[in-house]
Amino acid sequence: MRDIRNILVVRLSSIGDIVLTTPVLRRLHAAWPSASIDYCVKPGFVSLLERSPYLQTIFTTREAPSGEYDIVVDLQNNLRSRGVLKNVSYDRLYRYRKKNWKKLLLVRTGINLYDTLDSVVDRYMASMEEADDIADDARGCELWLKESDRKFAARYTTGRALRLGVCFGARHMTKRYPPRRFASVIEMLTEKLDIRFFLLGGAEDTPHAAEILSALSPEAASCVVNLAGISSLTESAAVLEACGAVLTNDTGLMHIASAFGKQLFVLFGSSVPEFGFLPYNTPYSLFEVPGLSCRPCSHIGKDRCPKGHFRCMTDIAEQAVAEKILDYFNSRNSF
C-alpha cells in the first residue's frame, strides 16, 4: 500500500467496544507511524481516548469529521456511523463485519456456528485483512489517565490492605450477578483476608450498591468503599488500576480493568464467550453455567429473565467465586 498520510477511525459507543478499539489504534500507528490518526466517538466517551498518544484529533457526533482521508475504518458499521461520514472522502474504506446473523442464530435456535472464540479485537482486525502492513502485537487494551484521576484514586487506595475492585453493574439485568450474591462473596473474603472492596459503577448502579451494602454485616461493610455514582469514568479506571484484582460482570468496566492487565474474575450470565467480549490478552477466571439450554437468551442482555428462574447467574455459587479469589490473593502478595 502506498504511503498513508491520514486515517479516520469511527466507533461511536459504548465503553467496552471503544476500549477494545485501542489495540487497533496502536497497530495502525505501528504500521504507519507518520500518519495522522483521527477518531469519531459520541461525546460521552471522549474521556476514554483524549490522552491517547496515537490520536491527532477526536471528533464527536456533534462536530463530525470532514475532508479527505487515505483510510477510513468504520468499527461501528451502522446507519449512525455511516451518517457521520457523509462529508468525508477516502481512498480506502474498511467496515467491521459484525456477522450478527451468527449471534441471532445462536440466541434463537441454539445453533452455534462459531468455530473459534475470537475477541471483538480480532474481528475488528479481520475487517482490515487486506492491509498487510498491520500486524498483531499480542498486547492488550490500553487506557490513558490524567494525574487528577490517579490523585482521586489515591484518596481511597492508601494503606496495605489487599484491594478488590467490584464492578457489579451492567446495563441489562440478565448480565448482573445479584447484589446479594456480591455481598456474600464480600462477606466470605472479609473473614479470610485483610482486604478492601471498591464498588464501582455509574449513577444508575447506585440502588444496587445500596442493596449490596444493606446485605453486609457491619464488619464487612466497614471494608467497602462505595464509589458508585461518585467517581467519573476515568476516576473509576484509576481506582481499578490501583486494585490487585477485579470481580466483574460483563460490562464496560471489565474492559477498562483489562487495560491495566488486572487479574479479572468474570461473571457471565446471559453472555457467552462466542460473542467476543471476554477480556482481551489479560489473565481472567470465567464463571458461567455451561450447558444451560436457555443461554444465551440475547446477544446484548435483557431486562428480565425470560424463563423467570435466572439460573444463568443464580447457579454460580458465591463460595466458588470467593474461593477462586481467595486462592489468587493467597498465592500473590498483591496490593
Image (tube, helix red, strand yellow):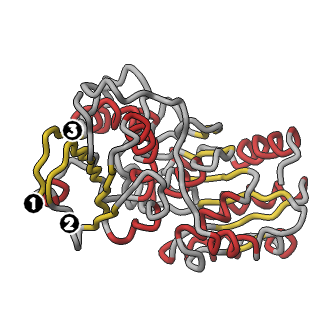
- Looking at the rendered structure, the secondary structure element under dot 2 is loop
Residue in the picture at 36% in, 38% down: 32
Which mark, by number, is residue 253?
A: none
What amino acid is labelled 1 in the image? Asn
User: Along the line of sight, which residue is nearer the eye, 182 or 28?
Assistant: 28
Q: Based on the displayed image, in which of its 4 quarters is residue 40 positioned?
A: bottom left
| Pointers 2 and 3 in contact (C-beta within 8 Å) | no
CA distance for labels 3 and 1: 17 Å
User: Given contact means CB atoms under 8 Å apart, are the residues at marks 1 and 2 in contact?
Assistant: yes
Graded by Cα atoms within 10 Å as few (under 14), some (14 to 19) or many (20 or more), the crowding at tag 2 reads some
- Can you give x and y, in whole percent of width and height, for residue 222 in the image? 83, 74
Q: Nearer the viewer, residue 28 or 111?
A: 28
Q: Amino acid at mark 3?
A: Tyr
Q: Which residue is mark 1?
A: 87
Judged from the image, the secondary structure of the residue bearing numbered disc 3 is strand
x and y percentages locating residue 206 in the rendered image: 56, 76
Q: From this viewpoint, is residue 65 visible? A: yes
**First in sequence: mark 3 vs mark 1:** 1
Q: Secondary structure at mark 1?
A: loop
Q: In this rendering, is residue 276 above or below 188?
A: above
Neighbourhood count class around disc 1 (C-alpha, 10 Å): few under 14, some 14–19, many 20 upward: few
Horizontal and vertical percent position of residue 284 = 64, 39
Q: Which mark is residue 64?
A: 2
Count of labels shown? 3
Q: Which residue is mark 3?
A: 94
Give the mark nearer the N terminus: 1 vs 2: 2
Question: How far, Cα to Cα, is label 2 from label 3?
Answer: 18 Å
